[in-house]
Image (cartoon, rainbow, N blue to C red):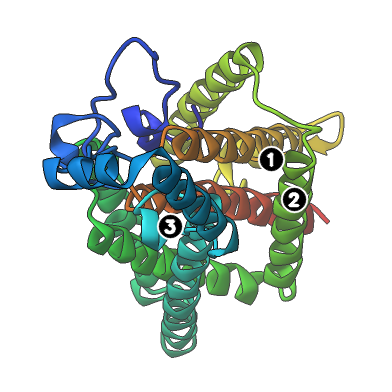
């Protein structure tokens, strides 16, 4: 699974022999009586009235009810209180709107720090705050969404991620002008192509590929930790801006080789995110879980953007 937040019964394939265990699941005790999707038997008075009208009356009422169902507009997420792909898409767009506003703040804040005191902590403070705050909220959302979905925490995550993205983008832009626009266009292109291929049914997540990607992601995480430790301890020459990423093999930066593989992993992670959201819709998950799906997509897209930003920076730095 691409995001641990999707390690939730609401997004897992359900055993038809068992009752789903997530809050609000169809058929669960916490769903309540007469909740959307549940059948409520008619009261005794209604049953007696049906008998009085006779079979002909019942047939006429059934016909009228059927015609009403065909002419009435289809029920949406609000009416059914169920998660839908469209509603999740709107929630995702809303979160990215918050992220962009916060990114503008982080951008201005970082540029102000760079101009006022070049090289000072003020130039990296916005994205450091965003990275730390986003990480903390991401952990809270991930480990608490199994019991309760808290949209407020997800909004807060979008704000912190916006500070991080805007701050680090401004920092890189001062070093390599034009880099952010290139990274943004590349990210939009990867997300757009991945979504189009998934929507057409040409790309789907498979159990075997998912295991391979998960192993690769864990290996990449270990590499990042080791690289940071080596940079902090001086084990790598300080002339290498990105540590081991800046080293070259046959004249090719290691960061470029690794970066291409990581972009593939991020794109496949998006496929897994889309697949998990569709599974949540099939499970009849409550509408509030759309926020969890939107959160998962945001985590993956931000990861993809940062990786592309680093690849382009390594290429520009190696010129």
From the viewer's side, name the closer residue of 285 and 137.
Answer: 285
Q: Which residue is mark 2?
A: 190
Q: Can you tell which of label 3 and label 2 is closer to the viewer?
A: 3
From the viewer's side, name the closer residue of 5 and 109.
Answer: 5
From the viewer's side, name the closer residue of 4 and 111.
Answer: 4
First in residue order: circle 1 vs circle 2? 2
Residue 264: x and y, percent?
A: 71, 35
- Number of numbered callouts drawn: 3
Q: Quadrant of the C terminus?
A: bottom right
Per the rendering, the mark at residue 305 is none
Q: Please tell me which residue is depicted at 59% across the width and 46% down the height of the picture.
A: 242
Mark 2 crowd level (few <14, some 14–19, many ≥20, 10 Å Cα): some
Dividing the picture into quadrants, the one containing residue 51 is top left
- Locate residue 121 relative to residue 250 in the image: left or right: left
Which residue is at the far right? 250
Distance in Å between CA atoms under marks 3 and 2? 29 Å
Q: Which residue is mark 1?
A: 263
- Residue 142 higher or lower than 108, as above or below: above
Disc 3 element = helix
First in residue order: circle 3 vs circle 2? 3
Distance in Å between CA atoms under marks 1 and 2? 9 Å
- Residue 5 higher or lower than 300, as above or below: above
Q: Can you tell which of label 1 and label 3 is closer to the viewer?
A: 3
Per the rendering, the mark at residue 77 is 3
Residue 255: x and y, percent?
A: 69, 39
From the viewer's side, name the closer residue of 10 and 119.
Answer: 10
Residue 239: x and y, percent?
A: 61, 49
Q: Please tell me which residue is depicted at 14% across the width and 31% down the height of the picture.
A: 29
- Residue 33 higher or lower than 95, as above or below: above
First in residue order: circle 1 vs circle 3? 3
């Amino acid at each position: 699974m691409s995001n641990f937040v999707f390690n939730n019964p609401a997004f897992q394939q359900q055993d038809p022999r068992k009752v789903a265990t997530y809050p609000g699941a169809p058929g669960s005790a916490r769903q309540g009586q007469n909740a959307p999707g549940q059948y409520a038997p008619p009261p005794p008075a209604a049953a007696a009235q049906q008998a009085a009208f006779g079979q002909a009356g019942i047939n006429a009422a059934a016909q009228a009810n059927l015609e009403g169902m065909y002419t009435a507009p289809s029920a949406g997420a609000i009416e059914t209180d169920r998660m839908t792909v469209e509603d999740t898409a709107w929630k995702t767009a809303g979160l990215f709107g918050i992220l962009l506003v916060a990114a503008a703040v982080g951008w201005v804040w970082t540029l102000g720090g760079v101009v006022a005191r070049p090289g000072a902590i003020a130039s990296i403070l916005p994205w450091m705050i965003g990275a730390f705050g986003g990480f903390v909220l991401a952990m809270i959302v991930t480990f608490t969404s199994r019991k309760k979905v808290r949209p407020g925490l997800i909004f807060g995550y979008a704000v912190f991620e916006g500070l991080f993205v805007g701050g680090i983008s401004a920092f890189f832009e001062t070093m390599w002008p034009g880099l952010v626009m290139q990274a943004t266009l590349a990210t939009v292109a990867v997300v757009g192509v991945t979504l189009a291929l998934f929507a057409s049914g040409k790309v789907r997540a498979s159990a075997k590929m998912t295991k391979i990607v998960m192993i690769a992601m864990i290996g990449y995480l270990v590499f990042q930790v080791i690289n940071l430790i080596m940079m902090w301890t001086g084990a790598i020459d300080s002339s290498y801006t990105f540590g081991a990423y800046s080293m070259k093999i046959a004249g090719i930066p290691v960061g470029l080789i690794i970066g291409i593989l990581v972009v593939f992993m991020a794109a496949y992670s998006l496929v897994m995110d889309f697949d998990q959201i569709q599974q949540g819709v099939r499970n009849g998950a409550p509408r509030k879980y759309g926020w969890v799906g939107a959160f998962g997509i945001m985590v993956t897209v931000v990861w993809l953007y940062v990786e592309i930003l680093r690849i382009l920076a390594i290429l520009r730095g190696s010129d």
